[in-house]
Amino acid sequence: MIQIFNTMSLQKEEFVPLVPGKVSMYVCGPTVYNLIHIGNARPMIVFDTVRRYLEYRGYEVKYVSNFTDVDDKIIKKANEEGVDCSVISERYIAECKKDMAAMNVRPATIHPRATQEIDGMIQMIGELIDRGYAYVRNGTVYYRTRKFADYGKLSHKDLDHMRSGFRTLKVSGEDEKEDPLDFVLWKPKKEGEPFWVSPWSEGRPGWHIECSVMSRKYLGEEIDIHAGGEDLIFPHHENEIAQSEACSGHEFARYWMHNAFLNIDGVKMSKSLGNFFTVRDIAKQYDLQVLRLFMLSAHYRSPLNFSHDLMESAKNSLERIVNCGTRLQKLSAGPGALTEAERENLTKADAYRVQFETAMDDDFNTADAVSAVFELVRFANATTADGTVSGEYAGALLGLLQRLSDGVLGIKTVRREEILDAEVEALIAERQAARKAKNFARADEIRKELADRGILLKDTRQGVEWTRA
Ligand code: AMP
Ligand code: ZN
């Protein structure tokens, strides 16, 4: 039985999906105006691991994660470079996907983009106006928070206290709102900004409406898990709840999961503070599997401080896992069937699987799950030390290690053999020939095989260029 700490109830609850055997999950994704930093990578790695574990437990998971591709920061960057906003967002979506792949974060089932969902947003804003949950002032549409009786239920904040604080600190331009906590659903364009036509003004949506719309469109009115970093609890997720529940009349998401911050010297890593490392920076120094193991070595609800020492220690830990996996792989190619003693050892090794599952069942305690993997590694090393084991025994241990480590944690256990330049060239030649013969299936297969081995292809007018990822 899986227990999930639900930010809504502030308790661990038994996970029971809406539809037996299926899980619908929405994770708020990044705003794409720059390379992602390793703080942004924390929710990606954490919730990818949650998804993998749910799949390991036999659930079919539909995982939706958006790209916010219309936003002040994107507009500012586009103006600085003198290009269209879509140039900026396309560029950083592509870069983000590369980082995700390098961190072994699987692509979502669907990655919707805000700019492609504007019609749905206009539709939902219209529904909110019709139901009295939204009002229009000079082309701006605001959400009427007072009307939504449950406003504040996720963030457990004293809203009256906040409201009175806001009143004394009134910001200019806020006077047209009925309540200081009312938030923007639609705003009129300013000079030089991208815009869409709506019944209220030529303009663009506020930030919060996109997630309500995409979640409803791709997962339905009620979903199992909604997740993101803890800074999203208020106001973003609170506002999503207000929007979605005002429209549907019932619960939006059953389990709310939030990861704690990745800090640096005890302070949240963020673009605005400038105290960040991009995933790309880290990739110059480390295999990103090290970053992934570093992240998973802490529980996702504990703050995690980034440091060189912890990364070095994660690097050594990764080395231990990979040495074991690579060795088991070699041994597994050897001859021999299980001996009686080996059979007994496999029963003992299975205890580490149980330990791993117990940890993951307890609100995805990856810190303890990683420890269980290390104990398995130690056991595997100890029982194969003399190198005389049967191939079947080594293979069984490797299979177990891979199910837990590669499968759930996303930590690869077997060292990738370096692919030689000549081999790459030969495969590229074969791919060109396949294309010429219009055998596109084979051509795609070769591209994929190369990608799996870390080789990226770029088709140019001069021919195929390739690089190592
Ligand atoms: P943003 O692009 O700022 O909307 O952030 C994308 C995701 O990264 C959100 O789920 C944020 O909560 C999360 N996030 C941003 N900074 C950090 C951090 N320092 N630690 C953990 N999560 C973060
Ligand atoms: Zn969101």
Image (cartoon, rainbow, N blue to C red):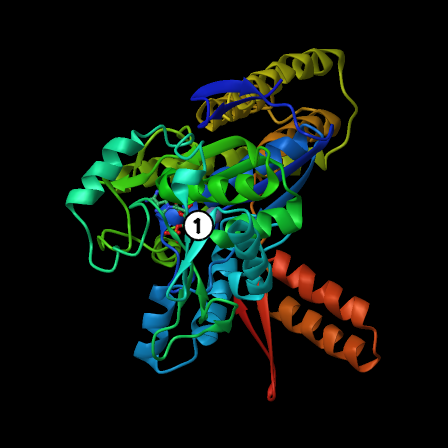
164 w.r.t. 16: above or below: below
Q: Which residue is mark 1?
A: 287
Residue furthest to the bottom in view is 462
In the image, 220 versus 81, the foreground residue is: 220
Residue 198: tell me if it is visible.
Answer: yes
Q: Badge 1, how many Cα within 10 Å: few under 14, some, many 20+?
A: some
Q: Tell me residue 101's x, y (percent).
A: 54, 54
Residue at 61% across, 20% down: 353
Give amino acid for label 1.
Answer: Asp
Q: Is residue 416 left or right of residue 432?
A: left
Residue at 43% across, 35% down: 258
Q: Tell me residue 147's x, y (percent).
A: 44, 39
Residue 232: tell me if it is visible.
Answer: no
Q: Tell me residue 282's x, y (percent).
A: 36, 53
Q: Tell me residue 209's x, y (percent).
A: 49, 53
Q: Is residue 181 left or right of residue 161?
A: right
353 w.r.t. 76: above or below: above
Q: Quadrant of residue 20?
A: top right
In the image, 448 versus 211, the foreground residue is: 211
